[in-house]
Image (cartoon, rainbow, N blue to C red):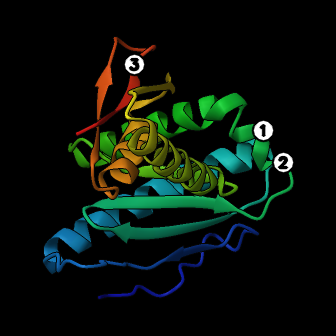
Amino acid sequence: MASEPDIAVDGDETDVTATTQNPDTEVDSDSDDYLIEEGEIAGDYLEQLLDVLDFDGDIDLDVEGDRAVVSIDGGDDLTKLVGRKGEVLDALQELTRLAVQQATGERSRLMLDIAGWRAGRRTELTELGSSAARRVLESGEREELAPMTPFERKIVHDAVAKVDGVSSESEGAEPSRRVVVIKD
């Protein structure tokens, strides 16, 4: 597990911190170095964006598994960058991925979180998947959940997979694709 020191950023109020976390798996240092570089490029891009918008925020760079994770926290107006149901956040994540791709020539799988919205959503969706799995296990009847993004569906599928006796699958076409929980 490697850690990078705090990164001073142009003497600004924006604080950028880079660390790596590789739970359960060892990732070679070349991969870690690339993901740290990817996170730093994303952090620089997002810092410029915050400056243009005149928003304050601390940018934290992590590596989780095989993906760079960039979080922006600490500013008063950051919820404006999340938008309704995370729509602005998703758009900013795609723009940040494009900025990284332009700089590196490689497609990025970077994950962006702002004001802890994605982390909170992950908790909600995990509970939703677990609850639906328990209901289906008790009733034996399949349950269709509301349409979700691929990110959201993955979290629900992972939560359902932890409950013995039930499984899940995705049905429908985007943007109405949904998770269906069924008894095995």
**Mark 2 secondary-structure assignment:** loop
Q: CA distance from mark 3 to mark 2?
A: 32 Å
Of callouts 1 and 3, the N-terminal one = 1
Residue 28 placed where, x, y %? 13, 77
What residue type is disc 2 on?
Asp
**Of residues 78 and 157, which is closer to you in this image?**
157
Does residue 178 sit above or below 74 in this rendering?
above
> Which corner quadrant holds the N terminus?
bottom left
Q: Residue at x 48, y 68 (%)?
A: 61
Q: CA distance from mark 1 to mark 3?
A: 26 Å
Residue lying at the far front of the rendered structure: 139
Q: Nearer the viewer, mark 1 or mark 3?
A: 3
What residue type is disc 1 on?
Lys
Q: Identify residue for label 1.
A: 80
Residue 63 placed where, x, y %? 36, 69
| Category of crowding for the residue at label 3, using alpha-carbon neighbours closer than 10 angstroms: few (below 14), some (14–19), many (at least 20) | some
Residue 131 placed where, x, y %? 52, 48
> Which corner quadrant holds the C terminus?
top left
Q: Residue at x 43, y 51 (%)?
A: 111
Res 77 label: 2
**Mark 1 secondary-structure assignment:** helix
What residue type is disc 3 on?
Arg
| Category of crowding for the residue at label 2, using alpha-carbon neighbours closer than 10 angstroms: few (below 14), some (14–19), many (at least 20) | few
